[in-house]
Amino acid sequence: MRKLLPIALLLILTLAVTTKNSLEAKDKDELIQLKAELIVLQKQVRDLQESTDKNTGQVSALLTQVVDNVSLARRDIGQTRDIVDRSLSDINATASGGTQQINQFAEKINAVNIRLERLEKQIKNVENIFSPTSIIKNCDEGEQQYKQAYADYLRGNYALAIDQFRNYVTCFSGTDAAGQAQYLIADSYYKQVDFKAAIPELDKLIVEYPANNKLATARYKRADCLLKTDRRKEAEEELKLIVQNYPNSAEARQAEQVLASLPPEEKPVVKPTRPRR
């Protein structure tokens, strides 16, 4: 904020020089109006400087509000991404012959997805400008730590939530809440479109917390991550496992739709060998 005053003064001098060079083209009323505007600008700069010096606490609160708004925007992007993914999945599931209109609509959805990814990266860059809140790094305040981590997760502060959830899992690995924390670690990576990082975290949930109530959802997201990282064969196996183990679940129905929508794999062309003479 203290840098605004020199900048404003430089602007005033520039305007003054420009005005001097063009006096002949300006009438007296315009010159008076310009001087009045410069006086107002000087006063605004002084008021801003005084306000900044006296209200640093308010400035800090404003920065915190900016971070919160950015986090909410990230959460909304994550929800929008889920809707887009479901829409694309529905299109693929219902397309029997694949008309040109459906293909064009699918391309539009993919384009929206790409724009969402770019916007997420921009939001993350803005958010990194501000200092994160303190992270609890001990095992004495488990309940408070979980609540703080979950609040950051809901606001879209995924990197911060991951650190706190990870510490919680380390401290309270044998509890049901630790399994939920492990799922939220994986889901935080998933919502950040970091599918490669999400896969081992989902694997850890499946292996170490097999009774977790989010297991079907975790397996479906694991299959989605595998598809999006070009591991189709593993993804198909995961989807079939979901249909087999959770037959009446929403995840099973989604898995069936995805399996039905997958295009046939292209078989490698084998060139005939020429017989030796």
Image (cartoon, rainbow, N blue to C red):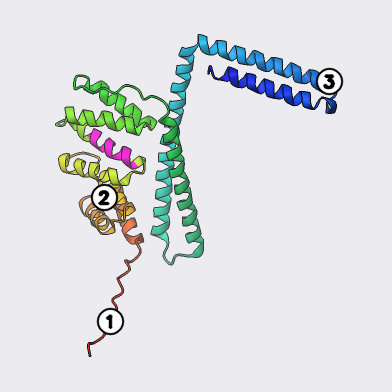
Question: Going from the N terminus, do you reach mark 3 or mark 1 first?
Answer: 3
The outermost residue toward the bottom is 277
Q: Helix or strand or loop: what does disc 1 sit on? A: loop
With 233 as the anchor, is 173 left or right in this view? Answer: left
Residue labelled with disc 2: 248
Quick check: is 59 in the magenta stretch? no
Inter-mark Cα distance, 3 to 1:
90 Å
Question: Going from the N terminus, do you reach mark 1 or mark 2 first?
Answer: 2
In the rendered image, residue 242, in percent from the top left (x then y), is placed at 24, 52
Residue labelled with disc 3: 29
- The amino acid type of the residue labelled 2 equals Asn
Position of the C terminus, as image quadrant, is bottom left
Q: Residue drawn at (31%, 74%), measured in percent from left and top?
A: 269
Residue labelled with disc 1: 272
Inter-mark Cα distance, 1 to 2:
48 Å
Q: Residues within 10 Å of mark 2 (few under 14, many from 20)?
A: few
